[in-house]
Image (cartoon, helix red, strand yellow):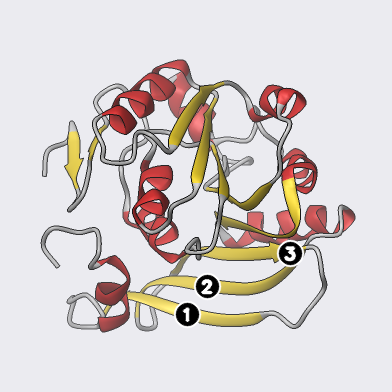
Amino acid sequence: MSNSYFQFKQFRIQQDKTAMKVCTDSCILGAYVRVAQAKQILDIGTGTGLLALMVAQRSQAQIDAVEIDKAAAEQATENVADSPFADRIRVHSSSIQAYSVRCRKKYDVVISNPPFFSNHLKRKEFSQNVALHSESLQLSELAIITSYLLEKEGSFIVMLPVHETNLLEAAAEEVNLYPYEKLHILEKYKGRQLRIITSFAFNPQPCVERTLYIKTLEGTYTPDFVSLLQPYYLYM
C-alpha cells in the first residue's frame, strides 16, 4: 500500500490530492451498508469516492456521489473513471445543500461519513477542516436534506462518533427519521469505541444494536471484521 493510493480487489483509490485518506472505519461503513436491492444510492461527502465504489461493487444501483471540495471531487471522478463501475457512478462537485435544490429524484439508500469534531481545535489545512469539522454541513442540515431526498421506504446510513451520533439522532427525529439499527465499532475487545454506524428510516421501530470488534486482544483481526472486509481487502 502506498500513501498516494490504496489498492482494493476490484478498484484502486488514488488519494494524493485529498486531505482525508482511506481509513478502516470508512471501509467498514462501505462494506456494512445493505445495498443489494437498491436502485438509487446517494453518497453525501464522497471524498475520494471510496464509499460510492464500495457499494457499487455489491449492487447494480445508480449512484450519485456529492463532494464539496473541488480537489477531492476531481480525484473521486478519476477513481470512478478508472473503476469497473464508471457507468453507474456520477460525481457531483457541489455542496449537498446546492445539490439538493436541483435534485429531482429520490434515493433508496443515502450514505454518509459526514463532518464531525465540531468542538475540536481546527487544523491548519483548510481541506482537512472541511472534512473533519462541521462548518460546511451542520448535522441538522444533514437530517433535513436527507429527509427530502430519501424514498418513503428508504434507509439513511451514517457513521459518526458517539457524541455526534446523539446530536444527529435528535435532529433526525425532528424530520421523522428514526434509528432502527446501530453498529458500535470498537478497536478491540474491551477497547475504546471508535464510531457508531446508525441506520435511520421514516417508520419508528425497535432499534437493534450490535458490536463489531476490529481486533482481538492479541492484535489479530476478528473473524467478523475479516468476513466483512474480505470482499475488498487484498490481504484477506
Identify the amino acid type marked 1: Thr
Q: Which residue is more in the foreground, 37 or 182?
A: 37
Q: Residues within 10 Å of mark 1 (few under 14, many from 20)?
A: few
Residue under the image location 79 percent in, 55 percent down: 172
Disc 2 marks which residue?
183
**Is the residue under label 2 in contact with that under label 1 (CB below 8 Å)?**
yes
Residue under the image location 71 percent in, 37 percent down: 105
Quadrant (top left/top right/bottom left/bottom right) for the N terminus: top left
Instruction: Give the label, 3 or 2, closer to the camera.
Output: 3
Residue under the image location 38 percent in, 34 percent down: 87
- Secondary structure found at label 2: strand
Q: How many marks?
A: 3
Disc 1 marks which residue?
211
Residue 201 is labelled as 3
- Real-space Cα separation, disc 1 to disc 2, in angstroms: 5 Å
Q: Residues within 10 Å of mark 2 (few under 14, many from 20)?
A: some
- Nearer the N terminus, badge 3 or badge 2? 2
Identify the amino acid type marked 2: Leu
Q: Is residue 182 above or below residue 144?
A: below
Q: Position of residue 138 (x, y in %)?
A: 71, 37
- Real-space Cα separation, disc 1 to disc 3, in angstroms: 20 Å
Mark yes or no: residue 18 visible.
Answer: no
- Real-space Cα separation, disc 3 to disc 2, in angstroms: 15 Å
Residue under the image location 30 percent in, 28 percent down: 81
